[in-house]
Structures are given as C-alpha cells and as structure tokens.
Amino acid sequence: MTKQPDHRHDRHGAHHDHDQHHDHGSELTEMQLRVRALETILTEKGYVDQAALDAIVDAYETKIGPHIGQRVVARAWADPAFRKALLADGTAAIAGLGLVSRIGDHLVAVENAPGLHNMVVCTLCSCYPWEVLGLPPVWYKSAPYRARAVKDPRGVLAEFGVTLPADTRIRVWDSTAETRFLVLPLQPAGTEGWSEERLAQLVTRDAMIGTGLPKRPHEAAS
Ligand code: FE
C-alpha cells in the first residue's frame, strides 16, 4: 500500500483528482481505473444516476469557479457587516449569499492585514475550497508546493512574483478534509466606494489562496 488517497474528502461531491500529475499519455492511472470501475458498478446497480454524475462534473467544470470567491471577497470589501459575518462563520455567510448550492463542512475566511499575509496549502494532499474557487490549479496539488509552502513561504511567494515587506508575517494554513480556507485579501487602496462588480474584477484566484495579491485599481475595467 504505497499511496492511499484520503477518501473522506470525496464526500464533498467533488472528485479529488490526486493522480492527475501521474498521468502518462492515454494510460489510465490505477486510481482512474478504480474510479471508472466503481462508477460502472454503481450505475449498473442503479445506486447512482449517470445524468446526475454528469451534472456534478459539469457544475465543477463550468459553473463553480473562482468567480464565486471573487463575489464573496468583493462583498466583504464593500459591506463591513458581511465582512464581519464572513470572518465569524465563513460557511454560514457564504451560504447566505445563495451563490452555491452547498458548502463543505467548514469554510474559514482568513483576513490579510497590514503586516500579516495568509497563505493556504494542503500538506497532506490537495484539500481546497472547491465551492468558492472551483477546480484547484495543478501547482496547488504538486509535492513541491505542498512541502515548501510551509518551510519557505517567502520563497514560494517570490516564485509567484509576490514580494512582501520583510516585517510582514506570513501565516500558512494547512487545509484538512474538515476545514478549508479562503484568504480575504487587503482591499487595494483607491478602491473605496467601488461597486461589488468592479471590486470583484480585482480579486484573483491566487489572491484567495494567498499566493498572489489583488490586481491594482487601474487593471479593472471601468
Ligand atoms: Fe487534501
């Protein structure tokens, strides 16, 4: 038993796709073969509806994505009451927006501040807040990111083109099957009073993982 992905994660309805980076050409990995076999059996026995499965896959491929997280962050920037609610209980606050049909067990928003930067990793595998960020980027699941985000966060950030002041503290959050994190970045200066729609354009996926910063005000469409 060399590599046993943690199946507890998959109750979130999303395929964890741990083995994508092992994929060589058309050969299916052992995990893909196992998933396919399981899917076939479940469908044949009538336990799952193929159309329902397709709908879930389609949702994660086309409907659920970082645009949801962008709306959450933009709302938090524009609406202090929502920001407070988000930081107090991310799961409830985001569910209340009605943008997603379901939220994983615990979605925790961690707020950047002057002198404090948050960054998210899953050292164990690839836990990720699918509901608000969609499919995770390949690097998020890579062994180097998972190992180095904890040991050398500043070095990792530099590779993402992010240089923080030397006295800025970096807090690294390790995701688990039970708890996912969403970084609430600092609102860019000069965007006070902007509409949520306009603010959302400044929010990047990486800024919500903590490996990036929001765009500058001039990068938003007017
Ligand atoms: Fe994981």
Image (spheres, rainbow, N blue to C red):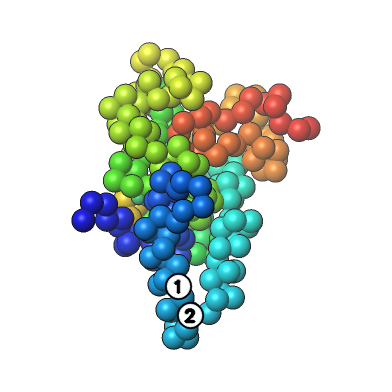
What element does badge 2 sit on? helix
For residue 121, what is the image quadrant? top left
- The residue indicated by pointer 2 is 43
**Position in image of residue 96 (x %, y %):** 53, 60
Depth order, front residue of 44/162: 44
**Position in image of residue 140 (x %, y %):** 43, 40
**Position in image of residue 171 (x %, y %):** 33, 31
Amino acid of disc 1: Glu
Depth order, front residue of 194/57: 57
Residue at 38% of width from left, 59% of height from top?
31
> Which mark is drawn over residue 39?
1
Where is the N terminus found, in terms of image quarters? bottom left
Q: Compared to 104, does 109 lie above or below? A: above
**Position in image of residue 173 (x %, y %):** 33, 39
For residue 145, what is the image quadrant? top left
In the displayed image of the protein, which residue is found farthest to the left?
1
Residue at 51% of width from left, 52% of height from top?
26
Residue at 51% of width from left, 21% of height from top?
161
